[in-house]
Image: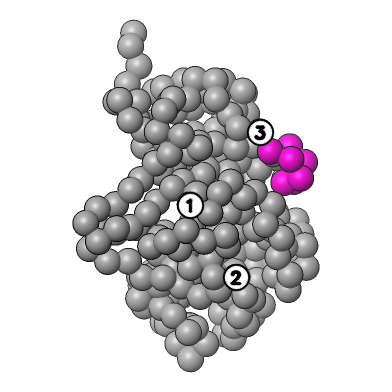
Amino acid sequence: VYYMGTTGGGVWKTEDAGISWKNISDGYFETGSVGAVAVSESENNIVFVGMGESPVRGVMTSSGDGVYKSVDGGDTWTHLGLEKTKHISQVRIHPSNPDIVYVAAIGQPFQPNKERGLYKSLDGGKTWENILFISNKIGIVDIEISPDNPNIIYAASWRGERKPWTIISGSEEGGIYKSSDAGKTWRKLKKGLPKGLIGKIDLATSAADPNRVYALIEAENSQGGVYVSYDKGKNFTAMSHRKE
């Protein structure tokens, strides 16, 4: 069973490993562009969807209207707010408690807005709290929960702004943030990571080795590339452009 979020086409589902697909969001979603889909590990019929495509494209980009949730494997959906986030790039669900949900919001790409950042719900999406807000121009583009400790969270911030004549990607406030107390407090990770303007970041953790964190980073001065930490973010090493 797989779920697929599309740009402009809503959510699709296959139950035969991709041989056939059916649309499961028509008639429920107000907008069609999907930025993130998450299925609960502990209760597989619970699915969260974040709307608004996560890449900010050069020609055009399609905004969304917040978060939707299904408790029956996509047969029916409920809208759970966060409409003004506009673009949601990632949704993560606590591995053993599906009522705990994190939503990474890039925000409005055409102008500043205060509704961007990292949101958390403790009641299955009925209410939301912004637990990591950097500025009205910088959103959160990716999040990862440590496989061995759900209180450890990694979040990547990004300023992605669309102008009629260009795309702005990056800021000095961009980078990777870590929380060890489920989002109550955060610190920015720095050792071994690029300096200066930091753009879009994609994060990954390893279930086989929870100490390992990967980051694909856009950065100025040829610092961009793949970085890896073997100690849960204390130190990073550039792997794609190492000097032997």
Quarter of the image containing the C terminus? Answer: top left
Vertical placement of 184 versus 81: above or below? above
Instruction: Look at the image and say whether residue 185 sits in the magenta stretch.
Output: yes
**Amino acid type indicated by mark 1:** Lys
Distance CA(mark 1)–CA(mark 3)? 19 Å
Which kind of residue does numbered mark 2 sit on?
Answer: Leu
- Magenta segment range? 180-187
Question: Residue at the spot x=58%, y=54% of the render?
Answer: 117
Q: Which mark is residue 137?
A: 1
Q: Residues within 10 Å of mark 2 (few under 14, many from 20)?
A: many
The residue where tag 2 is placed is: 82
Towards the viewer: 226 or 45:
226
Expressed as whole percent of the image width and height from the top left, the position of residue 149 reads: 73, 40
Q: Is residue 20 left or right of residue 40?
A: left
Q: Residue at x 50, y 37 (%)?
A: 173
For the rendered model, the colour scheme is one colour
For label 1, the crowd category at 10 Å Cα-Cα, with few meaning under 14, some 14 to 19 and many 20 or more, is many
Q: Nearer the viewer, mark 1 or mark 3?
A: 1
Nearer the camera: disc 2 or disc 1: 1
Residue 101 position, x and y percent, is 68, 60
Q: Quadrant of residue 91?
A: bottom right
- Answer above or below: position of 63 versus 152: below
Q: Which residue is mark 3?
A: 187
> Amino acid type of disc 3?
Arg
Going from N to C along the chain, the mark reached first, 2 or 3, is 2
Question: Which element carries disc 2, helix, strand or loop?
Answer: loop
